[in-house]
Amino acid sequence: MTGTDTLSENPGAGGGGAALLSRAAVIAIAMMFGLTYSLSAGLIALDLAARNLSETFIGANAAMHALGVLAMAVLLPRIVAALGIRRLVVGALVLAALVLAAFPATPIWLWFPLRILLGAASEALFVLSETWTNSLSTEATRARAMAVYTAALSVGFALGPLMLSVIGAGGAAAYLAGAGVALLAALLVASPKVRAPAFDRPSRESPLHFIRLAPVAMGAIMLNAAIETAGLSFLAIYATQLGWPESGATRLMTCMMVGAILLQLPIGWLGDKMDRMKLVVLLAAGATLGALLWPFALASEAATYALLFVWGGAFVGIYTIMLAVVGSRFQGSELVGIYAVMGLMWGVGALLGPVLAGLAMDLVPHGLAFFAAAVCFVFVASVMAGRRTA
């Protein structure tokens, strides 16, 4: 653990009611990040397509989100000590609400800067919710705390498409619903009963500094993003190409997400009982083997659902345990910097994953399975090599 900066207040240190409210606030922040990201990504794309705009235009607008993430990843470690986590989180939630409400009321050319602002708000929620969760936990319970956080994040990702399916993409209703939920979360976080950590001093290091500090964590987040986005893009297509009906194929991602939510708690419990890096290697090795079994399991509906349920939990568990590892080794503004760059690396992985998976699927029928297995294997090999070097 570094000694460069420290948390000057630990919300979990006392006051059971305040600690519980703080945990509820962090769960709300995590869910709001997942919800705003998943809701806005699908909603804006559908809205632009309904206006007969090209895929190139839609893709260019989506890329603005990444620009906002990049800008906030650089700024956040420098401003968190001055403004404080609570103010930044409330500001990010209010900004997200205002931006979502502004989309249906503004001309299309303004959607580009609005998307940048939404990306910046999402990155702030992503990083600060991780940091806040870490501050609420002790070393003995850190992995379980991060498991609850990851489960809440996955629930948020699931709620976005669900809201969109219920409300519909037409008109302003879905935008306003997302804005309303963000404002409710802001009210919860703004409560004086919610205790937030404070930092002694800002970190002014570059993103490269944080990559060098935690290279395995950066690899884990890129792995998570690459396979998650590739799965969202191609898993249903992969199944239909093998003869699955479209309705069954679209349920596979839901099955995987349910596993990712429900299995985080037992994985977090294991993370507090054994060496966490060994657990990361075991989970990644299991994800490698599980992906290689996809082509065989897809011949049976029951086997496919069972495999994807377990595989989704194990795969997302890599990310959960790496959050705990980073949280146990770093603290203060340095931890914010690492989590911020992890958010940036998520964007890199999300960009590369669908491209490489699509190429693999063009080459061989089971390209998606082989891509997932190969990426997980490379991660396992790099972690093992790093441990031997250390």
Image (spheres, rainbow, N blue to C red):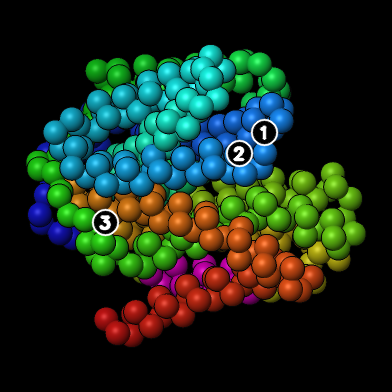
- Residue type for callout 2: Ile
What is the magenta range? 277-289
The crowd level at tag 2 (other Cα within 10 Å; few <14, some 14-19, many 20+) is some
Residue, disc 1? 53
Residue beneath the point at 76% across and 74% down: 364
Mark 3 secondary-structure assignment: helix
Q: Residue 137, percent across and down?
A: 29, 45
Mark 2 or 1, nearer chain start: 1
Front residue (pair 289, 371):
371
Q: Looking at the rendered structure, which numbered label has been put on residue 58? A: 2
Give the CA separation, mark 3 to mark 1: 36 Å
Q: Which residue carries the number 3 mark?
A: 207
Towards the viewer: 215 or 330 = 215
- Mark pair 2, 1: CA separation: 7 Å
Task: Say what secondary structure mark 1 lies in.
Answer: loop
Residue at point 46% right, 60% down? Answer: 222
